[in-house]
Amino acid sequence: MYALLKILRTFLRLIQVYAVIVIVANAARIRNLSNKAVLITGCDTGLGNALARTLDSIGFRVFAACLKANSPGADSLKSNCSEKLTVIQLDVTKDDDVEAARRVVEDS
């Protein structure tokens, strides 16, 4: 059973890497990235964090939604990405957080 779980985790990681590659490859065809924005959830760790870093590095305006705005992953994004990346505290299960995130994006 443990071996099967390990294989499944590896497979899921490969899917995540493939998803990032596809998104970045398609982003390369978009013109004027400087006026394009994206909101990414789950940026504390994993795929969301990697995608936020990658899209920031190629010129997108990134709103990186983290469960906690002061988590290690959020702090890393703040210190290692451009000023075009904004960390937003967002728990998608809380209406107040969703509304606050919407306001931040609209105001920008």
Image (cartoon, rainbow, N blue to C red):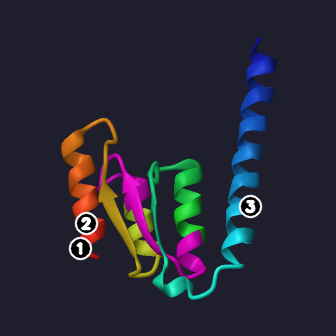
Up/down of 91 relative to 23, above or below:
above
Front residue of this view, candidates 55 and 78: 55
**Magenta residues, start to end:** 55-74
| Secondary structure category for the residue under label 1 | helix
Left or right of residue 76, residue 25 in this image: right
Indicate the position of residue 84 as horizontal and vertical percent values.
Answer: 41, 80
Query: What label does residue 107 carry, if any?
Result: 1
Disc 1/disc 3 C-alpha distance (Å): 30 Å
Residue at the location (37% across, 52% down)?
Answer: 66
Q: Can you identify the residue that label 2 sits on? A: 104
Indicate the position of residue 92 as horizontal and vertical percent values.
Answer: 34, 41
| Label 1: how many Cα within 10 Å (few below 14, some 14–19, many 20+) | few
Report if the CB atoms under discs 1 and 2 are less than 8 Å apart.
yes
Disc 2/disc 3 C-alpha distance (Å): 28 Å
Indicate the position of residue 16 as horizontal and vertical percent values.
Answer: 69, 48
Residue at the location (25% across, 66% down)?
Answer: 104
Front residue of this view, candidates 80 and 92: 92
Quadrant position of the C terminus in the picture: bottom left
Q: Can you identify the residue that label 3 sits on? A: 22
